[in-house]
Amino acid sequence: MPHQKILLLGATGNLGGYILTSLLSASPSFTITVLVRSTSNTTSLPSSIKRLTLPDDPTPSNLASLLKGQDVVICTLPGSNIALQKHLADAALEVGVKLFIPADFGSCDSTSPKVLEALDLYRAKAEVRDYLIEVAARPEAREKDFGWTSLVCGHFFDHGLHGSLLGFDVKGRKARLFDEGRKKWSACTRKRIGEAVVKVLQKDGEGSEGTDGVRGRVLFVQSFCVSQRDVLAVVEKVVGEEEMWQLEEVESAELMKGLIEDVKLTGDADKREELVCVMGLVDGDWRHREGFAMDLLKLEDENFEEVVRDTLEK
């Protein structure tokens, strides 16, 4: 049966607003409710959207009343929020939610042993996914048709190009190129992630199973798969080549080794972010991953140059 009622957490965040926009423009339409903290600024949300307030001390029992009647729960909260997502999963099962999409998304592959060893954030994402697998295996889950789907999207390209996530300082005309900048990596615009979420809901609503379905699977999507050199060439074309770029070439293996040690010893947030940046650029080609879902979800790559141009014009 097609999904109709969608509960979205994190609608005012870096990703949630884009998913909300895609849900609102989908056809056939969804009935959308957002679950927000009492401290959230919701002025950016359309007035037509129903808002519910997340309890200060969420538990499966007090969340169940908020989730009742929903077909799908989508989490775009920080992936490190393990306890809340587990409570939401238990509440979702109790009240008959059909599909749960956890806060997986970007930037790295949370199923990769290399990533899991290096980054606690992705161990948190894996812990939530393992819990969903356990919940979905319960007898009552089969009776109530409960399932889950994770989406892995790579670096958020439109967000990352404005910061340091992709190794570029466009305003300063500087770039850090890892392993000569020639390795390919998959990335998504946040608009594409919203489109992929809608495709997952529509596909699951069709009732497809196994490799023809989305349930119980980690699905990989992209806007395109490019290298840092590809990005540099198009950025230079868009912004002009009047100024010379400062290029720093970095060997990724040695850098990651040092960053992993620093993060384990100090927990430094900046070092952790740098490690996420590098790992997403040197181990982020989804095209040959099991679960690469572009065909399954009937998605095509976006026009790379148009995305770069649109991103830099914002």
Image (cartoon, helix red, strand yellow):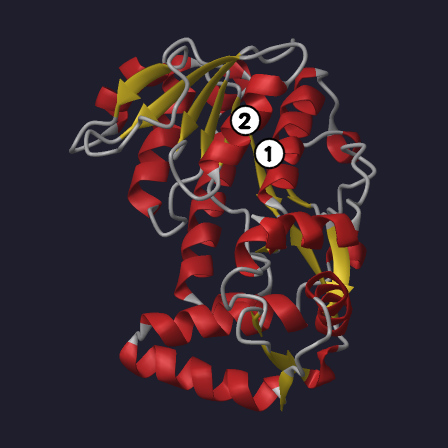
Q: Which labelled disc corresponds to residue 129?
A: none
Taking 43 as reference, is 228 above or below it?
A: below
Q: Considering only order in the chain, which callout, 1 or 2, is on the residue closer to the N terminus?
A: 2
Residue at 31 percent across and 27 percent down: it is: 42
Q: Nearer the viewer, residue 15 or 4?
A: 15
| Total marks placed | 2
Instruction: Give the quadrant of the N terminus.
Output: top right
Q: Is residue 295 left or right of 165 when viewed as pictured? A: right
Is residue 76 visible in this depiction of the protein? yes
Q: Name the one closer to the observer, 24 or 261.
A: 24
- Label 2: few (<14), some (14–19) or many (≥20) C-alpha neighbours in 10 Å: some
Q: Looking at the image, which residue is at 60% across and 86% down?
A: 253
Look at the image and tell me whether residue 289 can be seen.
Answer: no
Task: State whether residue 91 is above or below residue 282.
Answer: above
Q: Quadrant of residue 252?
A: bottom right
Count residues near mark 1 (Cα–Cα under 10 Å), then give few for <14, some for 14-19, many for 20+: many
User: In this orientation, which residue lies closer to the viewer: 243 or 37?
Assistant: 243
Q: Residue at horizontal 68%, vertical 32%?
A: 214
Query: Which residue is labeled 1 in the image?
Result: 194
Q: Nearer the viewer, residue 257 or 160?
A: 160
Q: Is the C-beta separation of discs 2 and 1 under 8 Å?
A: yes
Tag in front: 2 or 1? 2
* Badge 1 amino acid: Gly
Query: Element at badge 2?
Result: helix
Residue 243 lies, in percent from the top left, at 66, 79
Q: CA distance from mark 2 to mark 1?
A: 7 Å
In the picture, measured across the screen, residue 246 lies left or right of residue 134, that is right
- Disc 2 target residue: 21
